[in-house]
Amino acid sequence: MAENTQEVVKAENTAATQKVVEEDKHLYFGNRRSFLSKIAWGSFFAYFGLFVFGSVRGLFNRVIYEPSKSFKAGFPSEYTPGTVDERFKSTQKVWIIRTKDGFIAQSTVCTHLGCTPRWLPAENKFKCPCHGSGFYGIMADPKETAVNFEGPAPRPLERFKITLDSDGQILINKAVAFLGEKGQWDQPGAFLPYKG
Ligand code: FES
């Protein structure tokens, strides 16, 4: 009788244990399924959101505004013959060189590694503080002005297109550069003849 009772208790214990294991299994896989489902939905909504954002953004033109390459530099009478004018050095990176016969729009960018040379009127030259390149100042022959003569700079300073606008002001276009080493300083626009 006692043996029977023990077997019954044992069977009941085994059944109870089995039930707990089944419940745990259900709980574990249920939670896991729910977790994976949340990740799947989260990914879907994130992807959908990015898609909608990209589509809406594409409806608007993306325009990049760049500063104009052209600027007016005032009237020729504002410049003194035989001088290098620095009024546009910091804002436009241009020197206006007024020779006795006209104007040159000279780049202030050193042709070695791009530093900004200094204009030294007493020595009549442009001197780069970075590695010591020197460029001639105002010369009798305009083709020698701003030509490299010392230091590592491999070529003269560049010149920009310079013309007279319809209102009589000097117009400089930095989108057009003339390179002395390529013989471009003879081209129209590299020099603005002016007597006055
Ligand atoms: S950047 Fe001017 S000499 Fe090097």
Image (cartoon, grey):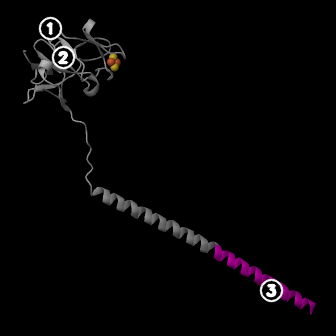
Q: Quadrant of ligand 1?
A: top left
Numbered mark located on residue 140 in the image: 1
For residue 17, side relative to residue 169 (left or right) = right
SS for tag 2? strand
Q: Residue furthest bottom?
A: 1
Contact between marks 1 and 2 (CB within 8 A): the answer is no
Residue 36 in the image: x percent, y percent? 54, 68
Q: Position of residue 123 (x, y in %)?
A: 27, 6
Q: Which mark is residue 73?
A: none
- The C terminus appears in which quarter of the rendering? top left
Say which element carries label 1.
loop
Q: Which residues make up the magenta segment?
A: 1-27
Q: Is residue 13 magenta?
A: yes
Above or below 121: residue 77: below
**Type of amino acid at the residue the image marks with label 3:** Glu
Q: Position of residue 160 (x, y in %)?
A: 18, 25
Question: Between disc 3 and disc 1, whose residue precedes?
Answer: 3
The residue carrying mark 2 is: 97
Identify whether 172 is placed above or below 157: below
Q: Where's the N terminus, which quadrant?
A: bottom right
Q: Which mark is residue 12?
A: 3
> Of 87 and 192, which appears nearest the observer?
87
Q: Quick check: 16 above or below 147? A: below
Of mark 1 and mark 2, the one earlier in the sequence is 2
For the residues marked 3 and 2, what is the alpha-carbon distance in whole angstroms?
108 Å
Within 10 Å of the Cα at label 3, are there few (<14), some (14-19), or many (20+) other Cα atoms?
Answer: few
Residue 191 makes an appearance in the image:
no
Task: Report whether the residue tagged 3 is closer than 8 Å to ligand 1.
Answer: no
Residue drawn at 25 percent across, 27 percent down: 92
Mark 1: few/some/many CA within 10 Å (<14, 14-19, 20+): few
Find numbered disc 3 in the image and state the secondary structure of the residue it sits on: helix
Whether the residue under disc 2 has CB within 8 Å of ligand 1: no
